[in-house]
Image (spheres, rainbow, N blue to C red):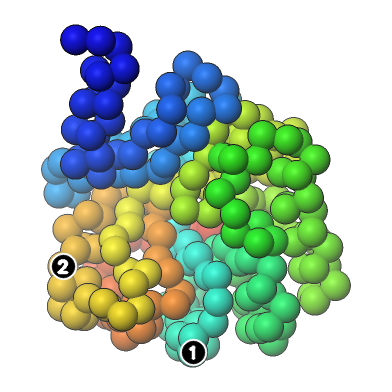
């Protein structure tokens, strides 16, 4: 079998498992899709990068797996009426979270962004325009996507943007990680997620709870989309069940001791 044919078959097999690989890992500019394979309930999933490799570039996807702790993160490309309820639930449970926002969101929802900050949540950089960052191999173009959002956040809140970055769609390359690190950023992936972003095909609350709880593991970095009506509906019950399981909620700053 030729090398190219082997790689195509391997990529197809990994895609079935939820791991998407684009390009050759040996290249620093090869695009890598952050995908997860949940093999064993209650255990951390397998991802395309291991923690030791990621930590070299100030990146992480998993916290302390020896402690019952969860890190709540939300991605938001736009607002559709769910975030206020999500913030209410987080406040009720005294649960810190990180909201990774794009420029369009900050421009159109300044009051919500200021509320996130005022209530002690972290606002992270999800880029100004939500491009596929793995395609930005030019450092100036990469830097502009992050710097423009920093400037907008400062203008909106009067505060410096915390230096946490999440690549849109989880698409990245080794060079991306290096460039983000050189700008003082820590890249935050995730170890727990489910298909919650399709607004025209939202899962039923019971299905979503079962899916998330079955994938819960110690040290999980949880990714939820704040655009999801289902997430807004189940969040109170979800956090209540996690608390009953003995979990505490910690800020993503703890991922980088």
Instruction: Tell me which corner region of the image, top left, top right, bottom left or bottom right, holds residue 4.
Output: top left
Front of the two marks 1 and 2 = 1
- The percent position of residue 133, horizontal first and vertical second, equals 60, 45
Question: Is 30 placed above or below 26 here?
Answer: below
Crowding around mark 1 (Cα neighbors within 10 Å: few <14, some 14 to 19, many 20+) is few
Residue under circle 1? 81
Q: Residue 249 or 102: which is nearer the viewer?
A: 102
Q: Residue 161 or 176: which is nearer the viewer?
A: 176
Residue under circle 2? 210
- The percent position of residue 203, horizontal first and vertical second, equals 22, 76
State whether residue 122 appears in this view.
no
Instruction: Tell me which corner region of the image, top left, top right, bottom left or bottom right, holds residue 142.
Output: top right
Q: Is residue 110 left or right of residue 7?
A: right
Q: Residue 22 or 171: which is nearer the viewer?
A: 22
Q: Residue 6 or 245: which is nearer the viewer?
A: 6
Task: Quadrant for the C terminus, please.
Answer: top right
Crowding around mark 2 (Cα neighbors within 10 Å: few <14, some 14 to 19, many 20+) is few
Question: Is 155 placed above or below 64 here?
Answer: below
- The percent position of residue 78, horizontal first and vertical second, equals 55, 76
Instruction: Tell me which corner region of the image, top left, top right, bottom left or bottom right, holds residue 111.
Output: bottom right
Which residue is located at x 29 percent, y 21 percent? 7
Q: Determine the secondary structure under disc 1.
A: loop
Which residue is located at x 75 percent, y 61 percent? 149
Q: Is residue 33 left or right of residue 144?
A: left
Which residue is located at x 47 percent, y 53 percent? 169
Task: Quadrant for the N terminus, please.
Answer: top left
Question: Is 233 placed above or below 221 here?
Answer: below
């Amino acid at each position: 079998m030729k090398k190219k044919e082997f790689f195509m078959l391997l990529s197809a097999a990994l895609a079935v498992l939820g791991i998407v690989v684009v390009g050759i890992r040996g290249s620093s500019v090869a695009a890598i899709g952050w995908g997860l394979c949940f093999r064993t309930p209650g255990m951390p999933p397998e991802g395309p990068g291991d923690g030791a490799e990621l930590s070299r570039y100030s990146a992480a996807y998993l916290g302390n797996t020896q402690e019952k702790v969860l890190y709540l993160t939300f991605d938001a490309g736009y607002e559709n009426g769910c975030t206020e309820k999500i913030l209410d639930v987080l406040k009720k449970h005294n649960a810190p979270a990180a909201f990774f926002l794009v420029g369009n969101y900050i421009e159109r929802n300044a009051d919500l962004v200021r509320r996130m900050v005022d209530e002690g949540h972290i606002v992270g950089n999800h880029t100004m325009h939500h491009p596929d960052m793995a395609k930005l191999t030019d450092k100036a173009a990469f830097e502009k996507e992050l710097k423009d959002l920093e400037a907008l956040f400062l203008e909106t809140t009067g505060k410096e943007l915390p230096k946490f970055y999440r690549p849109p769609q989880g698409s990245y390359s080794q060079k991306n990680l290096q460039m983000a690190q050189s700008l003082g950023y820590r890249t935050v992936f995730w170890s727990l997620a489910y298909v919650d972003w399709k607004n025209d095909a939202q899962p039923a609350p019971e299905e979503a709870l079962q899916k998330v709880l079955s994938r819960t593991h110690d040290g999980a970095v949880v990714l939820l989309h704040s655009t999801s009506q289902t997430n807004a509906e189940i969040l109170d019950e979800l956090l209540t069940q996690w608390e009953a399981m003995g979990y505490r909620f910690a800020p993503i700053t703890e991922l980088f001791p």
